[in-house]
Amino acid sequence: MTAPKNALILIGSPRLKKSTSARLGAVLEENLEKQGLKVSTLFVRKVFASPQQTEDFLAQIEASDLLVLISPLYVDSLPAPVTRLLELVAQNRKNREATTPKLFAAIINCGLPDPGQNTNALNICRIFARHSGLVWAGGLSLGSGEIIGGRPLSKAPPGVGRIKKALEIAAGFLAKGQSIPNRAQQLLEKPLAPWPIYLWMGSIWFYRAARKNKATSKMHDKPYCRAAPGRR
Amino acid sequence: MQAVILNSADKKNPAAAGAVRALKSRLDDSGWSLEVLNLAQMDIAPCTGCFACWTKTPGRCIIPDQGDLAAKALVNSQLAVFLTPLSFGGYNFHLKKALDRIICVVSPFFTRVRGEIHHQKRYDSYPKLLGIGLCEHPDKEAQNLFAALVEANAKNLHAPAEAAITIVGRPGGKAIAGLVDEALQNLAICPAEAVL
């Protein structure tokens, strides 16, 4: 496939610039630019802010040679606004005449340690590409995403060096019009931290956040239980 | 016994209407109560990923709209049905909006479920899960993905059992009822004699 000249990175997290997805996007953008591509970044949440923004977005999709979705995993698949966006793009491209082929790749990150939990979301992206006349260029799957915790990768713990390397490799291949190779994913397979420590730290984080909100005593509440409000 | 259908299909979708009719009939015969939430007509904003439902108002989403109805119905049911047009093998936007908002039904803390790490239970019991996907044309890849997604959700939501079926095209009521019957039997919801 011809090497793309420009790329559009779509950030799927509703947390916008402070999200782990945006931080990964910043590193990918830097690497794609190093390869000579002109790169733009869009936040999916903002695409639906007004009909004009939606229209501008669709035009931008058509003007891009390479599309990369970077998204968190929500309940085993893509967040609702990302689903809406993919539905919109597929609908818009349905009866479109064949144009220059566009590459589509996806990078999914989840809070749980096992990157394998992102598989269904990546498969949704692959089928979306098929339905939309895009060339699937593969994906990356990252577990333990909360280690980045919305910080720039330069300020995240040392283990994230492997994430940067994986993004660099991915950018190199995408810039040549090729699929992301397995060796980029292999760098993400090994846990960024031993999972018992990661989960313990996660629990502490949730507990501290609840303490800040004076809600620690309510953390095990069952408010939606109809039989007996409170605990069941 | 209580069941809820989270229906994200358009009102005019004949396959969805057929599936709701079949479920109503079978569950009625077995003495179940059924609630249907038509998600496309409900006011449900997307999840903002703020974690307030775990750390500020535990168990409850802070967005003041109809998003809590799905969570409430889910934890008070013994069967939850996800009825959705397939969107690239996954759930469509309306169902996904509702599901993203139900993470409050589990705890932020962790446990192992079927060998994988997931969040702990918040409630003592959770419903069995039946996924019903609707697609215009056969698409094996999308249909297999839908089944895998329902299985993953079942682990996440601590469902004691799960099943997934796909209704392709616009089959008649009898064919839809047959698929629904088989799924309910697989979930041990309706005894075989009740659906014959």
Image: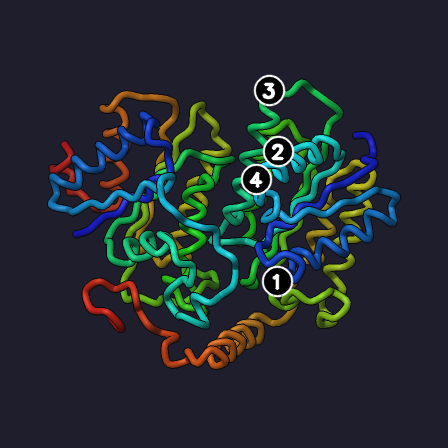
Check whether the beta carbons of the residues at disc 2 and disc 1 lie within 8 A of each other.
no
- Output the chain of dot 2: A
Where, quadrant-wise, is the N terminus of chain A in this rendering?
top right
Q: Secondary structure at mark 1?
A: helix
In the image: residue A29, left or right of residue B9 = right
Q: Nearer the viewer, residue A10 or B157?
A: A10
Q: Secondary structure at mark 3?
A: loop
Count of numbered marks? 4
| Residue A139 seen in the current view | no
Determine which residue is flagged by label 3: A95
Check whether the beta carbons of the residues at disc 3 and disc 4 lie within 8 A of each other.
no
Mark 2 or 3 closer to N-term?
Answer: 3
Where, quadrant-wise, is the C terminus of chain A in this rendering?
bottom left
Mark 1 or 3 closer to N-term?
Answer: 3
Determine which residue is flagged by label 4: A85
Mark 3 or 4 closer to N-term?
Answer: 4
What kind of residue is marked 3?
A: Asn
| Of marks 1 and 3, the one in the foreground | 3
| Of marks 2 and 3, the one in the foreground | 3
